[in-house]
Image (spheres, grey):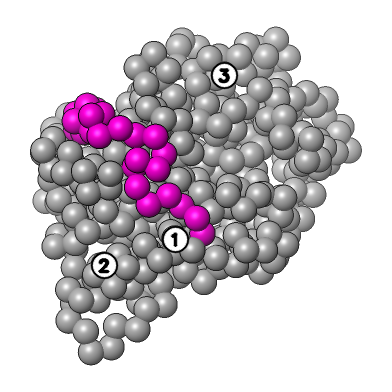
Amino acid sequence: MRTVWTFHIAQSIAFGQDAVKQLGDIATRLRAKKALIVTDPILEKAGLLERVRQPLIAAGLTVSAFTGGEPEPSMKAGLACYDQAKSFQPDLLVGLGGGSNMDLAKLAATLLKHGGSPRDYIGDDKIPGPIFPLICIPTTAGTGSEVSAATVITDTENHIKVGILSNWLRPTVAVVDPLMTLSCPPKVTADSGIDALTHAIEAYTAVDNADFPLPPGERSVYQGKHPMGDLCAEKAITLVGKFLRRAVKDGTDLEAREGMALAALLAGMGFSNVGVALVHAMEYPVGGAVHCSHGAGNGLLLPYVMRFNLNAKLKAFAEIATLLGENISGLSERAAAEKAVAAVEKLRNDIGIPNRLRDIGIRQEQLRALAEKTFGIKRILRVNPRSVTVEEIEGVFNEAY
């Protein structure tokens, strides 16, 4: 039985409207002279790159930008970012965008400091020490990458997303400015928001820390459900239930945008210590096969996995129903837990997340292979409150098909 849990986040967090205006002061405190901003052409066109560049230039920094970011980034994109960074020789990286751009920045920060290939670091706890100084600025409210210990890259050769996990990956500073999310389109808002909910629900219903089945001799940034993770997840679930529909319906609703930015941040703090579980393990091969967004894949699978895990965490799922605003007065614990699943299904429908794997291009004959790939992702399957077999995973895929 484990008796100790730990909690890690970014070294510091700046949260609030116009937080990006503090970038010059933050970079100066980090003694930076040259900064490379890692972003993509869409954010450059939307003017968000310039909003980050200006306070850095005003503080006297020389600034360049890598604009080759892409959705669900490939190792090729990661290496291209690294090559530009090597050529420019910055002393600070700034990841600007959704999780994809921040993950590229994390990968480049790892390679700048430690060299080698991205494949050298795939898995748990393979980064040997601190990475290159890194500021992360989210423009979506979902991944929590601005505080997390993970970077996810698409292995195009094997058609699967792969994860690098290390507490050294946590950014030096997270700058969370809700105003940076105002131009996020409705679909991206929905996909990223349901991703944040998935993070929070998987953290809240994870295997207990005391029972976390970490094999002898292995290390992991994940450690199972514990009180600090619960605090983050509870608030994140409440905020998503209150604000996600509003943010999708009206992107200029600043209260909703700020609520979702905080939800994503808190969910990121929670899951990156507790762990994510079966939803994510199933989404990685699905996303690798059909290149759906990570959030849409998670949101599609979430209620099916919740139903599979229900018996293992009835009390926690019943509490989730309340956190999502459901009235469970007079209901049995099981009925209340089932109401949590129904609430997530309704939210998913209301914001336009696909309901079925067939809707995103998965064919039924792929399900067995997807289940086998899922079963191989032990590092997050052990976070799940129920142990699973290949056949059970295939059964959940069939339910979702």
Q: Pinpoint residue 385: horizontal percent, then vertical percent.
A: 18, 53
Was residue 84 drawn as part of the magenta stretch in this picture?
no
Q: Pinpoint residue 353: horizontal percent, then vertical percent.
A: 46, 52
Contact between marks 2 and 3 (CB within 8 A): the answer is no
116 up-or-down from 149: above or below: above
- Where is residue 306, by image quadrant? bottom left
| Residue 271 visible to an observer of this rendering | no
> In front here: 255 or 35?
255
Q: Pinpoint residue 55: horizontal percent, then vertical percent.
A: 83, 41
- Residue displayed at 44% across by 24% down: 154
Contact between marks 3 and 1 (CB within 8 A): the answer is no
Q: Which residue is mark 1?
A: 349
- Residue displayed at 55% across by 65% down: 245
Q: Main secondary structure of the magenta part?
A: helix
- Residue displayed at 78% across by 40% down: 46
Was residue 367 drawn as part of the magenta stretch in this picture?
yes
Give the alpha-carbon distance from disc 2 to disc 1, as whole Å.
20 Å
Q: Which residues are magenta?
A: 351-375
Residue 317: assigned label: 2
On screen, residue 42 versus residue 98, left or right, reads right
Q: Secondary structure at mark 3?
A: helix
Q: Which residue is mark 3?
A: 77
First in sequence: mark 2 or mark 3? 3
141 up-or-down from 95: above or below: below
Give the alpha-carbon distance from disc 3 to disc 1, as whole Å.
33 Å
Look at label 1 and name its amino acid: Asn
First in sequence: mark 2 or mark 1? 2
Q: Secondary structure at mark 1?
A: helix
First in sequence: mark 3 or mark 1? 3
On screen, residue 14 versus residue 270, left or right, reads right
